[in-house]
Image (cartoon, grey):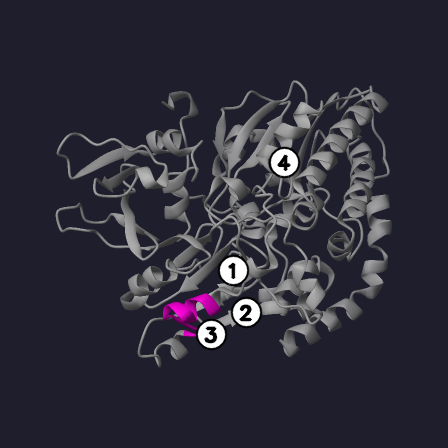
Amino acid sequence: MKRLLSVLALGLLAATAASCDWEHYALMNSIPARGDPDRNPVVHVYLGLDGLGHRAVVQARERGAFQGWNLARFIPMFPATSDASWSRILHAERFAGYEYGHYDPLKDKVYNKALGGMLVHLVPPLEGVSFMVPDYALTPSYYDAFDYHATAYLDALWSYDRPVYGYYRGLDNLFVALAGRSETQTDFFAYVLEADVIGHIRSEADVTEALVSLGQRIEEFKRNHPERTFVFTLFGDHGMDGVKKPIANVVDFRDQLEAAGVVSVDSFKDADREPGPAAVTILHTRTTYVSMHARPEKLDEVARLASTCAAADLVFARGQPPAPDYPEGLVWVNVWREGALVARFGYEAATDQYWLPAEGEWEALDLPVSFAPGARHGVFTDEALFALSADRTYPDFFFRARTAFEPISVKFPADAVVSFRPEFMSVGFKAPISSLNETGTAGSHGAMDALGSVAALVSEERELPAAVRSDTLLELFPRLDAHMRKRGVTRVPGAEGAALDYGALP
């Protein structure tokens, strides 16, 4: 912790000269160098709004925003958390963990623990002094995709201090940048942090108000720039559950694990010294999930005991086949609830199909799976299961649960992920001033359930399916894909089997 804080302090001091120029850079980067309206008659604008929840967009549309635009439920990865989710959506280089706080199994070490992880999360990209910053504290590479993402060096920190002010200030600068860039670009991609912060700190009503204002600003901007046609698309990385967490339910899950019989450790070396179940437990930043790493031989017991904890709704873990008569090579996921293995399923990559044992408690999971009479299992296509679950309690359940344990946008995925009940959240960090521990409890995200998972995709550019898997965004918007490539964004392969034939969905 002391080393990380020292590094951050040195980084901030060393960056002072560069950061003083940040506002100047933003200004100069937006001044039209030259341009002819005839050259760029149509400009496509893509806005990535952190925490853009589907419910908030629906409410904003009821108040007149985004009228005539196409709206889809945008279903992100699980756990739905910002850095990993943005990396996944944009096929950017992998992030070390689901968030800055993560476990590296190669070094058998936890990085960015507790408050240190929160500070790294808040302090913005340190591109100018990256040589002074350890790899585990560097900004995620997906930031390279954006034409605009901040206006001042400590923009993110001020946004958490005064999120509504930060939001409107950010919009002012965003539209100035857009006006300038549109003179020489036909595509523009920007990132807005503050919608997420408002949802964490204020309320869903405040998020809705902010979106109504954004809709008005977009229409005003179009009126003020009749020389071009601006076509907007907005999307988020996750939703926001809008459930206020009682302070008693803002929990250090390690305490509940200990009461259940699981010892939390910082390394597998320490875990191997324990006679009973032990796991490396990662507390993330005020989210509704916790990730765990455990030895394979102890994983089932760790997951089972974790599912008995008060905060746990479901626990997902790497699994194994229930019987030897299943095909070899299936990738299995176990689902635990209240100490019982309520479901499991296997995935066959060669056929992009899922094998579901009939004895699973599928109805209890709000998944209306049908089996042939007397069948011990069923085999289902990805499209069939996506359509079956997209509007249910746990949207895109099978794909999201499976890929939570694959190194797609995360280098070191967990062995088990605890999805919290809506009224609970992870403490993430404990502030030195006790009153600060209530900060960020107005809403959260990360759990498997739809409340905090389902984001929004709203667009003037094209018609949309009713529900969209976030992994397929760039397939639906090839202009954005091409723009990112022009910006030199390093691309990585997406999840196996992520593509969907939306036209063939049941």
Residue in the image at 78% along x and 27% along y? 216
Per the image, label 2 sits on a secondary structure element best described as: strand
Q: Confirm whether residue 274 shows in the render.
A: yes
In three-dimensional space, the C-alpha distance between marks 1 and 3, rounded to whole angstroms, equals 16 Å
Q: Is residue 347 magenta?
A: no
Which label sits in the foreground, 1 or 3?
3
Q: Confirm whether residue 105 shows in the render.
A: no
In terms of depth relative to the viewer, which is nearer, 169 or 481? 169
Extreme residue toward the bottom, this view: 273
Compare marks 4 and 3 and give the one earlier in the sequence: 3
Residue in the image at 13% along x and 51% along y? 324
The label number, if any, that marks residue 271 in the structure image: none
Location of mark 3 (residue): 266
Q: In the image, is residue 403 above or below residue 227?
A: below
Compare marks 1 and 2 and give the one earlier in the sequence: 1
Location of mark 1 (residue): 96
Contact? badges 3 and 2 (CB < 8 Å): no
| Quadrant assignment, res 181 | top right
The span shown in magenta is 255-267
The label number, if any, that marks residue 483 in the structure image: 4
Using a 10 Å C-alpha cutoff, classify the residue at mark 2 as few (fewer than 14 neighbours), some (14 to 19) or many (20 or more): many
Please, what is the three-letter code of the amino acid marked with disc 3?
Answer: Asp
Which label sits in the foreground, 3 or 2?
3
In three-dimensional space, the C-alpha distance between marks 2 and 4, rounded to whole angstroms, equals 34 Å
The label number, if any, that marks residue 111 in the structure image: 2
In this rendering, would 99 be left or right of 18? left
Q: In the image, is residue 176 above or below residue 491?
A: above
